Image (spheres, helix red, strand yellow):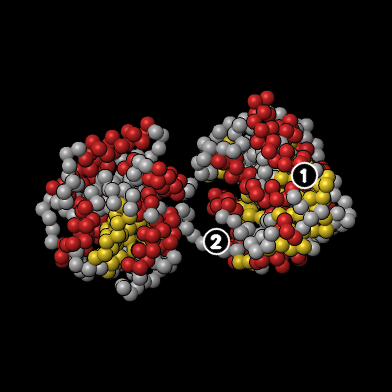
Amino acid sequence: MKAFVLQRYGSPLRQADVPEPVLGDHEVLVRMKASGVNHGDERLRSGEFKQVFPFKLPMVVGSEFSGEVVATGSLANQFEPGMEVFAYADLARMGAFAELIAIDEKALASKPSTVTMTEAASLPVNGLTAWNALVEMGQLHAGQTVLIHGGSGGVGSVAIQLTRHLGATVATTVSAANADLVRELGADIVIDYRTEDFAEKLSGVDLVLDSQGGDTLKKSLGVLRTGGTVVGITGPPDPDFAAQAGVSPVVKAVIRGLSSGMRRRARRLGVNYRFLFIQPNGDQLRTIAQLVDQGTIRPVIDRILPFDQTTAALGALLSGGIRGKVLVSTDSAAHRDAEGMKVDGRSQTTAPTWVTAPTKRIVAGGETLAYRELGASGGTPVVLLTHLGATLDNWDPRLMDALARHHRVIAVDLPGVGASSGTLPPAVKGMTEAAVGFIEAMGFTEVDLVGFSLGGFIAQQIALDRTGLVRRLTLAGTGPAGGAGINRPTGAAYVYWDMVRGAAARTDAKEFLFFNRDKTGKAAARKYLQRLDERVMDRDAPITRQAFGTQLKAIKAWGRAEPQDLSSVSAPTLIANGDHDRMVPSELSEDMHRRIPDSKLVIYPNAGHGGIFQYWEQFTEALLEHHSPVHR
């Protein structure tokens, strides 16, 4: 079956084929129809829970879902195949981002009859959190006042409705854009957190449901009446949670220490702080289902993405500004709705990104070349040629997304590289011919070229050989034929040495090759490599050792070649580099600027060969300026 798997802490979730779950005696096997995406999924992915829960990686992630029962264990007797259900899975087991999930029948409940299967998947985490915070922990009753932070979010939207049902006064913090929504849900007092201070507007509050933590949590203690309670769902865990989780004595001591300051602050103010960590509970879900069917609670959904876009859904949640719930679904009807319908007044279209751009193929020069493209057709396409050892996966998604908002951008694997067939030509001249063959096979008569490093050698040669083909030229981290330092005898050994350093440090060699080894460079390297890891599906094949060796020889030959007449480059040219390029000396960028007539030079400070990725925002602005329809 298909599932999204966490292979190691900190890595992106990856879709994979995994065995179907083995059904226990008291368990029910459910075919997932929709699953909710939660901040807890990200906290698990990042490794925040690994000291508390003994996760065994790799594991299938996802904690809430709706679906149809397909089988039951030998001792499970509450559900039958064909029944429509919803549930929250035990965090220690997870498993909801999968086509099938096995779950203890005590955690399961029949879905509300008045909502769709997809809508039902938005309720388990939000409903259980609101119920336990307000009813179980808060003991809320009519006439009291509750402050709910983030009222337009998933938990907040359900908590507001439940509070109204219980007869209490609801105060909530949201942005001005979401004020009408929370009023419609039942909020009595709406505070714009961007322009107003809730601590100045409220006092004597009986209960606070805090989903923000940090300073918001601290200030929330101050708005309570004596004896009031803050229930935190992101703030520091408390000793009760440690006991509930059954952790070791050492971890219990650590958890006690994490929340000691907050609990002392609460005691000084004569109030209480409690940390909420929900557990699977089918009985409570049945109560929530009744409230939904009575019209007391309605699901609030921000967007619904296809199941295979689960990683994108998690990214959307983390980007902020979400109203209600983000869901993924295996229901194709829901996908079409999500792409075009309005849910709670907001259009649910998902823009394609470089991370999700499909790999395409085209025959050029008798070989099948792999390429990816993004952006609207029309105008002059921007073709990108990349560096030594790189494939389609090595273009920075941030740079590509920003460029694609205004241009059609295309990256290609030359023959013998990545997923392309054939053998890589042994010299830059042959690589140039292969790149031109691709451009012509695509039907382009004019292109803008962006060449980085080795790709810059190829782009230069195209601009020299095919002057009418190139409208605009960008050369980054590269140098001219015969450039001093490109053919240094230690060049190949230098590259291989940094590859060994990268392997020893369990990181990509680009961290050493592209970035300075100071604090700034190391931070930029980590961010760049994290961005490259965002693509989960349809990743390119790595370059072969043979193709890599061919590229190294071609680079050395380029450095030994006779200098070319760069004054014949007619295309306006942007030249960019870091001020400390260890692979292609930065001085060569200045040399090209002097020799190419209509050129502009940008040198990024305290940056190396990957300066355009360290300063990707500034480089993107320069690219957009340079590749605009009218060159300025």
Question: Residue at position x 56%, y 33% from top?
Answer: 57
The answer to whether residue 575 is visible is yes
Location of residue 613 with respect to 248 vertically, above or below: below
Q: Quick check: 13 left or right of 383? A: right
Please name the residue that numbered disc 2 is placed on. Answer: 350
Question: Residue at position x 23%, y 56% from top?
Answer: 589
Residue 199, quarter of the rendered image: bottom right
Residue 58, quarter of the rendered image: top right
Q: Which comes before the other along the chain, label 2 or label 1?
A: 1
Task: Name the outermost residue toward the right.
Answer: 142
Where residue 154 appears, as percent x and y from the top left, is: 69, 54
Where residue 595 appears, as percent x and y from the top left, is: 17, 62
Location of residue 244 with respect to 599 vertically, above or below: above
Please name the residue that numbered disc 1 is placed on. Answer: 269
Location of residue 99 with respect to 316 vertically, above or below: above
Q: Quick check: 118 left or right of 504? A: right
Residue 306, quarter of the rendered image: bottom right
Three-letter residue code for mark 2: Thr
Spatial separation of the CA atoms under disc 2 and disc 1: 47 Å
Q: Secondary structure at mark 2?
A: loop
Locate the C terminus and report the quarter of the image it occupies: bottom left
Q: Which mark is residue 297?
A: none
